Amino acid sequence: MPLCSFLTRLGLACLGLVFASDPLHAQEPAAPEAPRVLGRTPPSERTDPADRGLLEGLRWLVRHQQADGSWSARLLANRCDADACCADPKATYHALYEPGLTALAVLAFEECGYGPAAQQNLVDTVRGKRARIGDVVERGLLWLQGLQKADGSVTPEKAFSYDEALAALAFTEAYELTHDDGWRACAQRSVDWLVRAQRPSPSGAGPWGWRYQSLEDVRARVGGDTTAVERELHDADTSITAWAARALGRAKRAGLVVPDPSIEGALAFTRWATARDGMVGYIDPKGAGATVTGKNDHFEYHPAVMSALGMSTRMELAPNRAEPFFALAAARLAEDRPRATKDGLSVDYYYWHAGTRALFEWGGRADANAAW
C-alpha cells in the first residue's frame, strides 16, 4: 500500500497505542448514535499498563525531532546514537513525506492531551535529557505553519493529500487544545484545501472521495488532455479518503467551516466501495479483499485494513453503531488479528493502527474486540 512506505516507524506505532487502552474490553453500546470520543488524559497521569508503551513512544519521538522542529525519515540517522541507528541505511527516504510525518508525530502528543501549551516535562531515559512537551509540540506545529501556503497546502511543491489531511488534523487538535485563533486559522486553511481537492461524484450529485493529488494539480499535470482529466476525474481511494474524512469530522466538531456536501460525499464514496461481506475495496467494491501493494513494501498485506478504514470513516462522519456493516467488518478484523512472526513480515503498523482505532471507535461486540 503506498502510504505504508512512510507511515511505519516514525510515530505510527505510538499513535496506535493511544487508542489501545480500551478496545479489548468494549461492551455493547447503549447509545448507537453517540460518537465515542477519545479521552485526553496524559498517559503520565493514568495507571493503565499500556501507558508505559505510550511514554516510551513519546520519548522516542522527542529524541528524534529535528532541530527545526520537524520529524524526518530522510534525516532520522542524524538523531540516532551511532551504535543504535533506527534508520535502514539501504532505504531511500523522500522529503515529500516530511510534512505528514511531522504532523503524525505531533498528533501522537496531541491525542495524549499534550498541546503546544503543555507544561509537563518528559525525561528521555536514554540520554537523560528533559524536554517540556509543549515546546516539542509547538516546534512541530510552527514548522508546519512555516510551510503552509496561501492555498492551505503544506507539501513543498505539489500538494500531497496525505500530508494535507494529517496537517489539518494536527492544526485542528492544536486549536481544540488551546483555543488559539492562530491555530484555528491554520486549520481552516488546511480544511479549505481538502474541500477543494475532493473529487466529484461520477453521478454528478456532488463531492466524492480523495486521491493523492487535487483535481487542480491533475489538470496542471495533464494539460489540455481532456481524456486524461476525465479518466482521473472521479478517481478516489478508501485510504486517503479515511484520513481526509477524519480531518473534516474533527474540524466540524471543533467549530470550523466544513461544507455538508463534503461530509456526505466522503460517506457516499465509502459506502459505494463496500462489499456485502464487510470488506471494502481500495478504489471500488470489485477490489474488496484484493491485495494492494506499494513500492518498497516489506510486510504482508492485510485486506481487512480497508474494512477498518471504512469503519473509521463512517464512525467519524455518521456514527450509527447498529448499522450491520460494523459487525461484518469487525468480524473480518477478528479473522486477521495482529501477530508478530520471526521474519517481521506480519508486522503492518498501518493495519494495526487502523484496526485498533476502528474497533475502539465502534466499541461494538466484546468478542470481536477481545479477539483483536
Image (cartoon, rainbow, N blue to C red):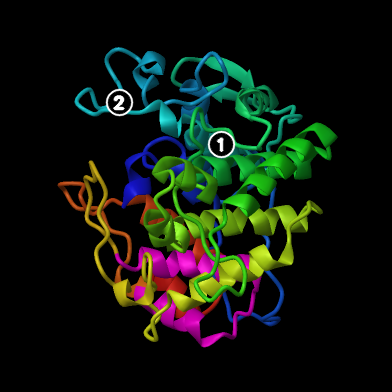
Q: Residue 211: percent from the left, percent from the top?
A: 46, 54
Between 110 and 6, the one lying in front of the other is 6
- Residue 102 appearing in the image: yes
Position above or below: 74 against 299: above
Separation of residues labelled 2 and 1 (CA atoms) = 19 Å
Q: Which residues are magenta?
A: 303-332
- On residue 103, the disc is 1
**Depth order, front residue of 210/133:** 210
Q: Quadrant of the C terminus?
A: bottom left
Q: Image quarter for residue 279? A: bottom left
**Mark 2 residue type:** Ala
Residue 219 drawn in magenta: no
Q: Does residue 319 show up magenta in the picture? A: yes
Number of numbered discs visible in the structure rendering: 2
Q: Residues within 10 Å of mark 2 (few under 14, many from 20)?
A: some
Q: Which mark is residue 87?
A: 2
Residue 22 falls in which quadrant of the image? Answer: bottom right
**Is residue 24 in view from this perspective?**
no
Tell me the kind of residue under disc 1: Ala
Q: Are marks 2 and 1 in contact (CB under 8 Å)?
A: no
Q: Residue furthest front?
A: 224
First along the sequence among labels 2 and 1: 2
What's the magenta bit mostly, secondary-structure-wise? helix
Tag of residue 241:
none
Which of the pair 321/167 is nearer the observer? 167
